[in-house]
Image: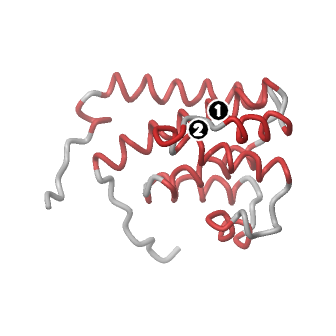
Amino acid sequence: MSETRVHLSKTEPAAYQALDAFSKTVGEICAANGIDDRLKELVMIHCSQLNGCAYCTRVHVDRAIAAGIDVDTLTQIPTWRESHVFSDRERAALELAEAFTFISEDGIPDEVYDHVGGVFTEKEYAALSWVCVSINAFNRVVVAGRYPVRPRTER
């Protein structure tokens, strides 16, 4: 197994910069449409976990903590269906995150679309959808490049 992979963001920085600019636009759309950092980070963490992207998971866990999400809530993300720590909006967003991450399997099933659309406005739904598109793109870049996640040093 090759440890060294093509680092897409270094090899073709213009494409990565465009993806980064897209991500910033998505953040602005979220802010303009009532999607706060807490909800956005929960979605980004869940997509990253589902994609097996340790690098993005770490980045977004750090951002989630900065946004005020406690450790107990963070540890409940993979088991959100069984956990009662999430609001109805958070549960709907996590469900949408799963549908977008596994879109090749079933698309966005009608029951997911109807449920999530019943919780969020059209603008909120669109903003969360773009969050899913953005983080799934980043996950693919990072997983393909095997970006390392090393143990943290003592602080």
Q: Residues within 10 Å of mark 1 (few under 14, many from 20)?
A: some
Which residue is tagged 1?
129
Where disc 1 sits, the SS reads helix
Q: Position of residue 69 (x, y in %)?
A: 75, 60
Where disc 2 sits, the SS reads helix
Name the foreground residue: 102 vs 12: 102
Residue beneath the point at 51% across and 55% down? 50
Q: Which mark is residue 40?
A: none
Name the foreground residue: 124 vs 24: 124
Q: Do the residues labelled 2 and 1 touch (CB within 8 Å)?
A: yes
Seen in the picture, residue 91 relative to 26 is either above or below; the reply is below
> Label 1 sits on what residue type?
Ser
Seen in the picture, residue 137 relative to 72 is either above or below; the reply is above
Q: Position of residue 146 (x, y in %)?
A: 29, 53
Name the foreground residue: 37 vs 52: 52
Query: Image check: 77 left or right of 119?
Result: left
Seen in the picture, residue 54 relative to 134 is either above or below; the reply is below
Query: Image check: 113 left or right of 22?
Result: right
Q: Residues within 10 Å of mark 2 (few under 14, many from 20)?
A: many
Query: Image check: 78 left or right of 135?
Result: right
Q: Where is residue 44 in the image (x, y as percent from the top left)?
A: 60, 47
**Quadrant position of residue 68:** bottom right
Q: In the rendered image, which quarter contains the N terminus? A: bottom left
> Label 2 sits on what residue type?
Cys
Residue beneath the point at 69% across and 43% down? 40
Which residue is tagged 2?
132
Residues under labels 2 and 1: Cα distance?
5 Å
Determine the residue located farthest toward the bottom in the rendered image. Answer: 154
